Amino acid sequence: MAEKASIVLESGTVDKLMAGSIIVSGAVANGMDVNVFVTFWALMEMRKNAPENTKLGPEGKGMEKQLFSLMKEKKVPSWKETLKQAAEVGNVHVYGCAMFADLMGIRKEDLDPMVEDVIGVSQFVDMAKDSKMTLFI
Amino acid sequence: MAVEESVKADKIIDARGSFCPGPLMELIKAYKQAKVGEVLSVYSTDSGTKKDAAAWISKSGNELVGVFDRNGYYEIIMRKVK
């Protein structure tokens, strides 16, 4: 059976989301099955109608303009595209967090189709407990 | 004749301009569709791919034909063994 990686995406800033989706790709390249649990601000960004994301974490304050224009110029794929590509290459399952979805009134159909289900934390921990790698980003 | 010149790629994946992990992911996609014995070549301008792709090729039990500096980009050539 393939080794498992379990990753929680919590931050909704582009730097963290990109890092997370690139690590998912790296896990897939290493033959791992990946479960991604999307919660809080990352779940907000996973909504179909989320506005264009131009947020960076605190260290990136003031760098937004420069970074995003460089990314556009160099045609860097968005974190969502990177995550989708990883799911095409390997076994990636993306789940939304039921608690935060309930809190914010987000329904499964409001989320990007790559989110295959909205599940509770216990179900995710059950999937994650025998993972080789767990990350909270 | 140099080794690399004697190996003809069955498929070339031109991933120049694509960022990490793009070139490696495109190589893996092509690998999945390829038949055993086929030679795949990936072009990349991303410096990380040179090491990442070479490591993936060896680790996945395939044959790394070579990594070549092609004056402005890298060419990584593999043969599908399994």
Image: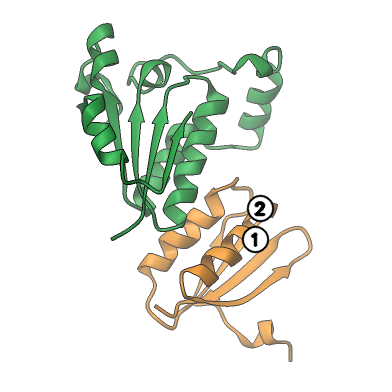
Label 1 residue SS? helix
Q: Quadrant of the N terminus of chain A?
A: bottom left
Q: Which chain is orange?
A: B
Q: Give residue A97's mark.
A: none
Residue type at numbered disc 2: Gly
Q: Residues within 10 Å of mark 1 (few under 14, many from 20)?
A: few
State the residue position of label 2. Answer: B48
Residue at the image point whose x is 46% and y is 40% from the top: A82
How far across and how far down the image is residue B23, in percent? Answer: 55, 54
Residues at marks 1 and 2, CA–CA distance in whole angstroms: 6 Å
Discs 1, 2 touching: Cβ within 8 Å = yes
Residue at the image point whose x is 46% and y is 69% from the top: B60
Number of numbered markers: 2
Q: Residues within 10 Å of mark 2 (few under 14, many from 20)?
A: some
How far across and how far down the image is residue A27, in percent? Answer: 45, 50
How far across and how far down the image is residue A36, in percent? Answer: 35, 36
How far across and how far down the image is residue B35, in percent? Answer: 37, 77
User: Is any atom of residue A116 visible in this view?
Assistant: no
Say if B38 sits above or below A15 in the image.
below
Figure colour scheme: by chain
Q: Which chain is green?
A: A
Say if B58 sits above or below B21 in the image.
below
Q: What chain letter is assigned to the residue under label 1? A: B
Q: Quadrant of residue B9?
A: bottom right
Residue at the image point whose x is 65% and y is 37% from the top: A74
State the residue position of label 1. Answer: B51
Q: Residue furthest right?
A: B71
User: Is any atom of residue A15 visible in this view?
Assistant: yes
Left/right of residue A119 with respect to residue A12 in the rendered view? left
Say if A25 sits above or below B29 in the image.
above
Residue type at numbered disc 1: Lys
Left/right of residue A63 with respect to residue B43 in the rendered view? right
